[in-house]
Image (cartoon, rainbow, N blue to C red):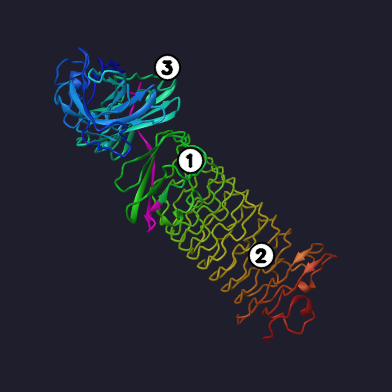
Amino acid sequence: MKTWKWVNTLLMCTLASTIISCSGNEELTDEITNTGKDELITITVGTGANTNTRVSYDDDKVGSSNEDALKWEEGDKLLVAGYANGTLKGKEIYIISEGVGKTTASFTGTAIEGATTYNVYYPSSITVDEPTGGATFSPSAQTQNGNNNTVHLRDNIFLQATNVTDLNNITLEMKSSIMKFELSNIPTDIGSLKSLIWIVETDNGSKNMVLNLSSIADNNQVLTTYLSFISEEMSVKANGKFTVILQGDKLYKAEREIISGKKYEAGNRYTAEIDNSPETMKWEELANMSFTVKVDENLGFNIPFPTSGETPANIMVDWGDGSVLTIVNKGTTLSDGDDFNYKYAETGEYTIAIYSDQVDETEQQIPKINFWNNRDNNSNSSKLRLIGTPLLNTGTEDFSYCFHGCSTLENIPEGLFDKNINVTSFKYCFYYCSNLTSIPEELFDKNIEVTSFEYCFQGCSTLESIPEGLFDKNIEVTSFRYCFQGCKKLSNIPTGLFDRNTKVTDFEYCFEVCSNLTSIPTRLFDKNINVTSFLGCFQKCSTLESIPKGLFDKNIEVEVFKGCFSNCTNLKEVPEGLFDNNKKATNFMSCFSLCSNATLNKNIFSNEGSTDRFSGMNMLFNYCFQNAGEQNENPGEAPELWKYKRGGSTWNTTGCFYNAKATNLTSDNEYNTEWGTPLNWN
């Protein structure tokens, strides 16, 4: 069976194959001007032998001479524009006065003073340009009630007669067209059908029309629908796409590229037949994603796309409040005034769904998304409650700040970033998501190009655990700076968490203020042989009790341990030779400051207690052991740094042992001035 068919039936005379009856609901508006006198006249709108000018449309009687096919109806109105020497003199609405139910009727209205020629239009809502007199018509929202029903067409046809000199002999010609969609083998899981969306690629970009559907049986696999359209607006360019989307519980599309294009002609009816054949037009479920927001008193929410660039595909948004889909065509310029901004009728939680007709996940499906700083004054970050599905392909390499400050975000779905395989940065991605309690396994497994997780989970104060192997696939990462800083409920670190991240150079402040962390896994950093800095890495981990022996044995490139364990007030033991292999380390500033319960070890810097350990190196020991062990009843021995050889290098030792407590520290020793006065506790 051939699955794609164009039926091009010229509407005989004026209207023949189509439509409808002019709605009698148009009201006289302020735009209608009366430049004539209050004289009422009657005009006659007739048809030739082969012309049907009116519109109760029955598809089975297209082109028929049967008068039941097309006829005028009660309340029909015309717009008459009068001209003299090419100048618009006025325009008036004429209302049907005789001929209801017939193909020829009379219409009565006010004469237009000074007019010698006339343009006559149906419907009366046609817009006539004041200076030029040109007319424009856009079909209104169309709703088809029931399968194979054409009643809705009557309000959406465009008829006209121009340069009329005899108002008693008018023949209207049809300027709009009709597309008939014959659809079959519709996927059953689509559920109750809500709308049909027709999208075409034209020489002027993508264009769309929507047909709302009602009273269509659930799981209906065969559907016939009709849309009235303006031919020149929907003509398909060469190599342009013709797309039909059905909206139900899901959205499905059928699409075809038309190599030679398709130019539609006014007054014709066309048929598009789609039967789900793989060779031509097959139904495919639209790519989609969803998230839930809680809207506050300002009632606004903006999809957090950029305000520059263009949409990479045709995108539809279901705002979750029962309203019709918002459709934004491919190639639409993104701006603060585009259709991705919405205002709800009332406060509450809403699940928003975003659909893209680019179903190939390897291609960009939506613009870059960022809840933190895309779009002004929308407070998006505080409104996001949960993410229901993985993100669509955003075509970006940077997810920095994506969920920054989403303080009410409760969950992250599995595979959230799976379609964004080219991402290189997750800096600040979940920064201060203070309601986030867990991270799914394999969250970053597809993001093998990532180089930075700096600040990624900083401030996630209710995060309770880190899944094993979270970073196993991210072998290009160079920085975990501040990654879990401020995760105050984090109680443990998985063994081998960083084993695959051999290119990392920076763990600065990685676990700072993880105040519920009691231990560090043995050999946590063994594979990170390129690390140069552990600045503040475990600073303020106030419940940390111990440091595993050999923790830094493999990190031979490290230069900085500044503040690494500062303010670890519950730390009890410092293992011998902790820094024995870190021969390049020169900055130990405040490393153990305020570790008030620590038992110091004399050989912390060298297993053998070698006094030439730092000879010839410019060292920073200022405040290294400030207040260390001051609350410990059984203090250990402090490293006797004052005895170490300097070899002519410069050392900063200010306050190194200030108020520190150890068995080999006394307040009257010779190092007090240069190294700081220790606690006088004997």
**Which residue occupies the foreground of this view, 230 or 596?**
230
Disc ID at residue 138: none
Disc ID at residue 578: 2
Q: Is residue 229 visible?
A: no
Quadrant in which residue 428 is drawn: bottom right
Residue type, mark 2 in image: Leu
Residue type, mark 1 in image: Leu
Taking the image as shown, residue 307 lies to the left or right of residue 189, namely right
Identify the residue at image location x=47%, y=35%: 312
Secondary structure at badge 3 equals loop
**Which residue occupies the foreground of this view, 463 or 196?**
196
Q: Position of residue 237 (x, y in %)?
A: 43, 22
Taking the image as shown, residue 171 lies to the left or right of residue 491, namely left
Up-down: is 245 above or below 615? above
Question: Badge 3 is on which residue?
Answer: 260
Identify the residue at image location x=23%, y=30%: 39
Q: Position of residue 206 (x, y in %)?
A: 42, 30
Quadrant occupied by the C terminus: bottom right
Taking the image as shown, residue 258 lies to the left or right of residue 405, namely left
Taking the image as shown, residue 598 lies to the left or right of residue 374, namely right
Residue type, mark 3 in image: Ser
